[in-house]
Amino acid sequence: MSHGPTVDDVIAVAEFRAALRQFMRRSERVARGSGLTPQRYLLLLMIKGSPGGDEQSTVTELSERLQLAQSTVTELVRRAEDAGLVAREQSQRDARVAHLRLTEEGERRLHRSFTELQTERRQLAEAFSHLEQAAAV
């Protein structure tokens, strides 16, 4: 006989999902307050926070990280370029590849949003910790 989740399990997951949703909503408001759409904030964050630590990315890498079609990311990048937030640089190794980096304005807006969300990231980490504790029991 299979035992379903306990009420405590369901409460822990519900609380985590509520915390995650609150984080996402607050992130959207903070991004807009910094003059960024939520999608642009995420784009800038993914470029600046690229896994290689070189603060640049390609459209292909961004497509994978954002789980979006390459055509969608290409359009997001084009609009961010038009807004003066992102710049392209041709790869030294492969002329078919363009590396994306933040402009000074992109850096400024990302920094403002990122800094304002420190408390929310801490609260989300606490909610995740509670979820892990509930799963361990």
Image: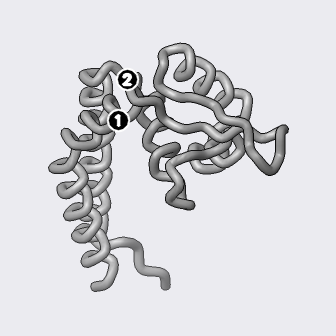
**Left or right for 95, reference 123:** right
Q: Are marks 2 and 1 in contact (CB under 8 Å)?
A: yes
x and y, in percent, of residue 109 in the image: 32, 29
Give the residue number, with chain letter if any, for mark 1: 110
Q: Secondary structure at mark 2?
A: loop
Q: Which of pointers 2 and 1 lies earlier in the amino acid sequence?
A: 2
Give the residue number, with chain letter if any, for mark 2: 36
Residue at position x 68%, y 28% in the image: 74
**For mark 2, does the 10 Å Cα neighbourhood hold few (<14), some (14 to 19), or many (20 or more) residues?**
many
Residue at position x 25%, y 70% in the image: 129
Which amino acid type is shown beneath numbered disc 2?
Leu
Q: Secondary structure at mark 1?
A: helix
Q: Does 4 sit above or below residue 67?
A: below
Q: Does 117 sit above or below residue 17?
A: above
x and y, in percent, of residue 97 in the image: 77, 41
Q: Toward the viewer: 129 or 100? A: 100
x and y, in percent, of residue 50 in the image: 53, 53
Q: Toward the viewer: 133 or 42? A: 42
Furthest toward the front, the residue is 92
Q: Nearer the viewer, mark 2 or mark 1?
A: 1
x and y, in percent, of residue 99 in the image: 66, 41
Residue at position x 38%, y 25% in the image: 105
**Left or right for 87, reference 132:** right
Mark 2–mark 1 distance (CA, rounded to whole Å): 8 Å
**Quarter-of-image position of residue 23:** top left
**Left or right for 34, reference 65:** left
